[in-house]
Image: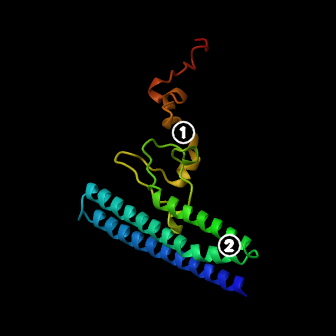
Amino acid sequence: KVAFILETLSSAVDAIGNITSQAISIRADNELRTLEEKRKKGLISEKKFEKESAAIKTEAAKKQRAADIAIALAKIPLIFLQALVSAPFPAGLIIASIASGIALAQVALLASSPLPQFKHGGQVSEKLGLIKGKSHTQGGVPIEVEGDEYVMPVKETRENLEVLKAIHKGKFKELFIPKSQLIQPDIFANIPN
């Protein structure tokens, strides 16, 4: 009975976390849409658009992190109680203490992790640039980019990943010859007059 109550409370905390994440995402999307409309109407400059959209995304990422930390903190007592009832005394108390310590460490990691910054580009799975995570409709992945960096849509990235890797490694010119430097063969050279 206690395990059922704890599981129900844990599910409720998860649901609150999901609702909070959706609210943060919806608000940021609405603010970005309004900002985009202002840019299209010429009410704000491109530079101001970029600055304000970056601020909106950064603020959303900060709010999401705060929500994640709050949910993780709310789960610590539940984790403690679940572990406490999982084994007889004193083993349950030892397990509960260890589980709570691990949960606190996870909170510390959440609190100390910086927002992603892609100064050197590349593939995230290789500690550089191809970003893995949620789609835009699922809230996306909050990142920080700097001026003059280029972000590619998913479809084009998938279709051109090897080209993008070559560009990133500075080997694009070695792999691809510009059209202006191609030598056109004289197809009529071997035809007798």
Q: Which residue is mark 2?
A: 93
Three-letter code, disc 1 = Lys
Pick whichever, 2 or 62, lies toward us. Answer: 2
Three-letter code, disc 2 = Leu
Label 1 crowding class (10 Å Cα cut-off): few <14, some 14-19, many 20+?
some
Q: Residue 140's x, y, as percent?
A: 50, 63
Question: In screen coordinates, is 125 left or right of 1?
Answer: left
Q: Which residue is mark 1?
A: 165
Image: 6 above or below 125: below
Residue pushed farthest right? Answer: 88
* Colour style of the rendered protein structure: rainbow
Looking at the rendered structure, which numbered label has been put on residue 121?
none
Specify the quadrant of the image occupied by residue 187.
top right
Residue pushed farthest top? Answer: 193
> What residue is at 76 percent from the left and 76 percent from the top?
88
> What residue is at 57 percent from the left and 74 percent from the top?
75
Disc 2 from disc 1: Cα separation = 51 Å
Label 2 crowding class (10 Å Cα cut-off): few <14, some 14-19, many 20+?
some
> What residue is at 54 percent from the left and 54 percent from the top?
154
